Image: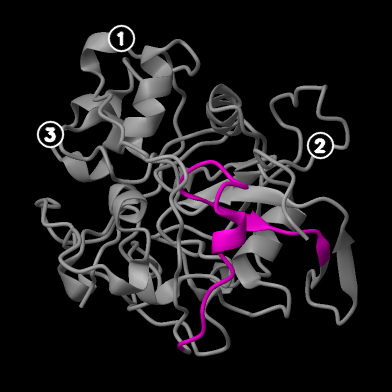
Amino acid sequence: MFERISPLALALCGLLVGCEDVDSAPTEDSGPAGAAIDVAIDVVPLSPDLLDVTAPPQDAGAVVEVQTSDGTEADTDEEPEASVCPPVMAWVPPGEFLFGPGPLAKPLDEGYCVDLFEVTAAEFNACVADGGCEGYEAWPMCQEIDLKLSPNQCVEGRGEFAANYLDWYRANSYCAWKGKRLPTSEQWERAARGDVGFTYPWGEDPLDCDRAHQGRGAIFDACVDYGGLPNRPIEVGTYVTGVSPYGLFEALGNVKEWVDIREDRTVSPEDGDSALSRGGAYNEGEWLMTTLAYDGQLGPQITSQGHGVRCVSDPLVAPSD
């Protein structure tokens, strides 16, 4: 039912539509079946000896073609612009798009590159090991017997699972360490819904359990145990039928993704300042599972099992017209 596309498969295959025998869906034991719990906690640094730093290798210059659920090609890097973006990122050109629920188009004057996948546990742990990010050593949940609630970064074998329990500061630090940045809310929305303003990344077909990792919580439980997948954040690239027009995987569900709403990016936010995440998390309900929805946080220090990140960057070279 779920045929996972890994970052490594993207880099090596080049053409997603023609790839065969890609990684299968996650098979790790998710622990006792049941509702996942979203818990806000404080975080402290993790020592390097606890880290899994085997981040998926990335072959520079990979060309990506993705088909959306209606059979049309997603607007990822095409051959003339194959080197515009870093590996496993998609080019989003400047232009107008529908932003928010209204009918008016909003211009984006500059193009940008966006990660096709949410940041993985291994990628974040590599940042911690290099000193670019704060980690998790004393998190009580890293020592939990029930590993369902543990951060993916703390559990062996979850290197390609989405990094979670990230507050805004850690998400921002990771993107900066990669030479990238957090997307603005406008950048996130355009990459997730395309230029014509889809309600969902895949179009207007209704939300279901096959297209997004959602509805797997204690309250919103419509998809609990569906497809044999764990009821917590899972491997990136699992939901191949939910890809956005620009090629983003898991833009809805799995982990919600921090965005940057600062007017002045030189000023760091303080605890309690306004902060936003987009895309909804695995344990949240339908009201957050649209490309229009956003989750207003009580501050950038907030973190939970459902908080993750996806980065954007400037192009490597000026794109061709």
Q: Residue 54 at what x, y percent from top left?
A: 25, 28
> Residue flagged by tag 2: what amino acid is it?
Arg
> Residue flagged by tag 3: what amino acid is it?
Ile
Check residue 47 in the rendering and tell me which mark sits there, or answer none.
1
Specify whether residue 180 is in view.
yes
In depth, the one of 101 and 14 nearer the eye is 14
Residue at image coords 47%, 24%: 42
User: The N terminus appears in which quarter of the rendering?
Assistant: bottom left
Dot placed on the residue nearer the N-terminal end, 1 or 2: 1
Element type at marker 2? loop
Dot placed on the residue nearer the N-terminal end, 3 or 2: 3
Colour scheme of the rendered structure: one colour
Q: Residue 84 at what x, y percent from top left?
A: 62, 47
In depth, the one of 80 and 232 nearer the eye is 80
| Residue interval drawn in magenta | 71-95
Residue at image coords 39%, 82%: 208
Identify whether 319 is placed above or below 179: below
Specify whether residue 77 is in view.
no
Residue 93 in the magenta stretch? The answer is yes
Residue at image coords 44%, 40%: 60
* Residue hosting label 3: 145
Residue at image coords 79%, 77%: 101
From the image, state whether disc 3 or disc 2 is nearer to you. Answer: 2
Q: Residue 98 at what x, y percent from top left?
A: 80, 74
Q: In whole angstroms, how far apart are the C-alphas of marks 1 and 3?
A: 20 Å
Element type at marker 3? loop
* Residue hosting label 2: 262
Identify whether 284 is placed above or below 117: below
> Residue flagged by tag 1: what amino acid is it?
Ser
Q: Main secondary structure of the magenta part?
A: loop
